[in-house]
Structures are given as structure tokens and as C-alpha cells.
Amino acid sequence: MNKWDAVEKDDKTIYRVTEKVRNVLSYMPYAEIIFISALTGQRLHKLFDVIDMVSENHAMRVATGVLNEIMAEAVAMQQPPSDKGKRLKLYYITQVAVKPPTFVIFVNKKELMHFSYTRYIENQIRQTFGFRGTPLRFLIRERNEEKER
């Protein structure tokens, strides 16, 4: 948020503006918000710290074993959805790319993986590793049990 020097402020302004921005950008809850003034230089030094942190998170890689532990705990805490007697099974998760961090989750039936459950898994990963300031991509792939045997 630039031009912070031009804003009439009281002790709650920053909270109100942050809430308004979060509502408008609700699809980007991971986005960092920093209040700066290019004119006065207010908080500009913090901007570069945030850029460095976001760049590190954008390139972060997580080991498959650790991801699978997180997913197993998440599944134990909240069972995957089911539809018409068919339950979603999550087999494993792996990170396949960075910039942005991209994960593939292998499941039994792709159509059973509701976006809200994907978001739940994302939140568990973010809770563990942060990934502040960067989007995460999730690809859902089917693993055919018959072919695996």
C-alpha cells in the first residue's frame, strides 16, 4: 500500500484498511500487505525484506516424506469427503515444481476431491511451512489401484 503518508490516520486505520484489502483480495489470503510511502521513504526498508522473504518462499521445496506426514495427519483429523458411498482416498503428495510451489496429490477418484478439501490440505501445509506471500498450486491425479498391483 503506497502513499501511506497521504492517508488520514487514527489508531485503527491500519486494521480497517487491512480488513478492506483482505476482503477485496479474499482469493489471495497469502498475499503480504505492507504500508509504505515512496515519497517519504516510510517503511521502504521493510519492503525489501518482504520481497526477499516472498522470493525464498516462492522457491521453497519440501521433501515428499514430510508432505506425506502432514497429509496423513490432516486426513486423520478430518476424513476426506465421500459421494454415493465412494470415499476419497489420498495416496500420497509430492512437490513437483517451485516458482510457484506446485504439488501433486494422488487419489483414487479425482472427482471426489472437492476444492474445499484441497484448500484444507493447503492450509495444513501453510500452517507447517508458511509459504507466506506465494500462491501454491495443487494438481489432483488419479492413481489406478489395479495398475499399481
Image (cartoon, grey):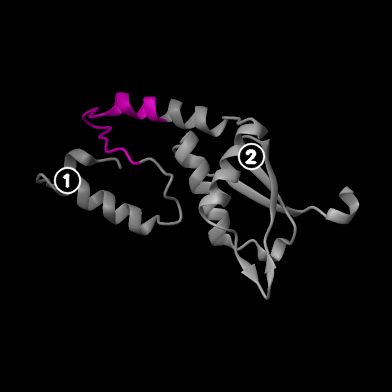
Rendered location of residue 4, percent (x, y): 22, 40
Q: Nearer the viewer, residue 23 or 140?
A: 140
Which residue is disc 2 drawn over?
Answer: 68
Looking at the image, can residue 100 be seen?
no
**Quarter where residue 112 is shown:** bottom right
Query: Which residue is rendered at x = 74% and y = 62% of the image?
Result: 109
Q: Amino acid at mark 1?
A: Val
The magenta-colored residue range is: 33-50
Q: Nearer the viewer, residue 5 or 125?
A: 125
Q: Which mark is drawn over residue 7?
A: 1
Q: Nearer the viewer, residue 122 or 31?
A: 122
CA gap, disc 2 and disc 1: 47 Å
Rendered location of residue 20, percent (x, y): 28, 56
Magenta stretch contains residue 44: yes
Q: Amino acid at mark 2?
A: Asn
Query: Which residue is rendered at x = 60% and y = 31% of the image?
Result: 62
Rendered location of residue 67, percent (x, y): 61, 37
Q: Is residue 60 left or right of residue 22?
A: right
